[in-house]
Amino acid sequence: MADPSNPTAGAADDDERTLLELERRYCSWGDTVHYADPPKFFERAEGSYLYDREGIPYLDLQMWYSAASFGYGHPRLKDALVRQLDRLPQLASQYLHTERVQLASALGRLNRSKFGLDGRVHFNVGGSQAIEDSLKIVRNSTHKNLVFAFMGGYHGRTLGASAITSSYRYRRRFGHFSDRAHFVPFPYCFRCPYDKKREDCGLYCLQQFEKNFETEYNSFWDPKAGESEFSAFYVEAIQGTGGYIIPPPGYFAGLKKILDERRILMVDDEIQMGMYRAGKFWAIENFDVAPDIVVFGKALTNGLNPLSGVWAREELISPDVFPPGSTHSTFSSNTLGTAVALEVVRMTGEIDYETIAREKGARFLEGLRTLQRRYPKVIGDTDGMGLALRMEICHEDGRTPDRDLTDRMFREGLAGRLAGRRALMGLVLDIGGYFKNVFTFAPSFEISEDDIDLAIDLLDQLIRRCAPPDRL
Ligand SMILES: Cc1ncc(COP(=O)(O)O)c(C=O)c1O
């Protein structure tokens, strides 16, 4: 164990046991999640694989919550980073650099072609910070603090983002949140909040939302002034942390109509689903809706030098209404991040990620459905759109969430003792969902068909090892 009186001792200790001791003593646990106990070290990353300190490979099916969608160590993106590192590694964001302007223009043009709307792009470094910036854009243009957001939604952990994220657990220790969002049930059809059936519900949940505006006494709407007390609705087109829940057709188009009629903005959080995760550049494109504001991060730089951003309609963000310094941050349009992001956007223009995500996603989903048919007393639901896929682990009845089994499978995947094609290997999984019983899969776009089949085989092994024998 390192000598605590020697300030540099920790740097020299690199055996795993000592590092874990040092981590327990010197690292804040508040900036991580500590799902695995003890937490897992990795040494190397390439393509769809992480390698631990013994060199054991782990097939990664969550790719850093979709931040590394294009695969670890992607050569073209790495080159873009290195080129920028050699030429203009840093620059105060008050000065301009080429990539910043080219990236904003590329995204602005892309959104013009997708949504038919003019707009501008605003940069920051993390998803939550971009959410904060979007909240300022909303408040600045509407002069209102109150927003709607979805139950099960996740928008980050800064104070503003926590206020619009549904989990009370994330707010409980941090005082009173006076402008906490009004949370609306998400159309989670497998667990319908109104106990309806998708086949004949007539989008009952949407009707319930619209009822809020029927009379002033429902508290949302002043019919005389024709004005809502609420300025915006924060949405994830497919809920990420909520468990990769895919809404039914027609829901978002109906919601946008209700909002437009009340002059309430739609803010589309694409931080986890953006950049082709759900088969289109933006997930919301799957639902034929043009949002007023789009927030993005994660895969924009494939998890290399962080960069996030907000695109907003011109009327909301033009310098006349949102002047210089409205939200400024030292690292906002950092040169390394913009260079990699520009390469990502160029790559998505040259390579058909829509087809890649659709075809690989279909193969993965077929594998999950085979498992569901094989283990009906373990898997309650499977679904997917593009390469955003889900599998709910449930008890015998196919519905009651089985969180313990989900945790056991997660831990066994990380133990690195599964039978690979040639040697032992592991599986990196992510657990999400309202009841923490959903495996949310976000494999790399580069994953091979062989590795998709291997993933299904490894999940099968996890079920056989972890589920009680009478449920197999
Ligand atoms: C949909 C969504 N919004 C916001 C965030 C917060 O982003 P960050 O963790 O970069 O602050 C996340 C992160 O997982 C997310 O998935």
Image (cartoon, rainbow, N blue to C red):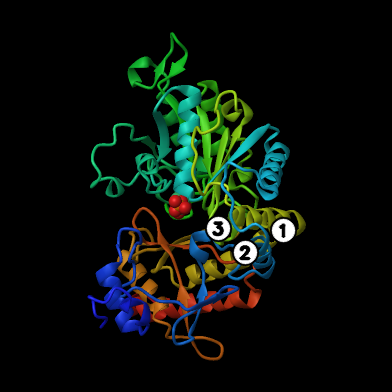
Q: Which residue is mark 1?
A: 347
Q: Nearer the viewer, mark 2 or mark 3?
A: 2
Tell me the distance, in whole angstroms, between the alpha carbons under discs 2 and 3: 18 Å
Residue ID at (51%, 27%): 259
| Placement of 91 over or under 232, stated as above or below | below
| Placement of 336 over or under 148, stated as above or below | below
Q: Which class describes the residues within 10 Å of circle 1: few (<14), some (14-19), or many (20+)?
A: some
Depth check, front residue: 114 or 171: 171
Q: Nearer the viewer, mark 3 or mark 1?
A: 1
Drawn side of residue 17 relative to residue 317, left or right: left
Residue ID at (38%, 78%): 412
Q: Are marks 1 and 2 in contact (CB under 8 Å)?
A: yes
Q: Which labelled disc corresponds to residue 384?
A: 3
Residue found at the far right of this picture? 350
Q: Which residue is mark 2?
A: 70
Dot 2 amino acid type: Phe
Drawn side of residue 58 relative to residue 347, left or right: left
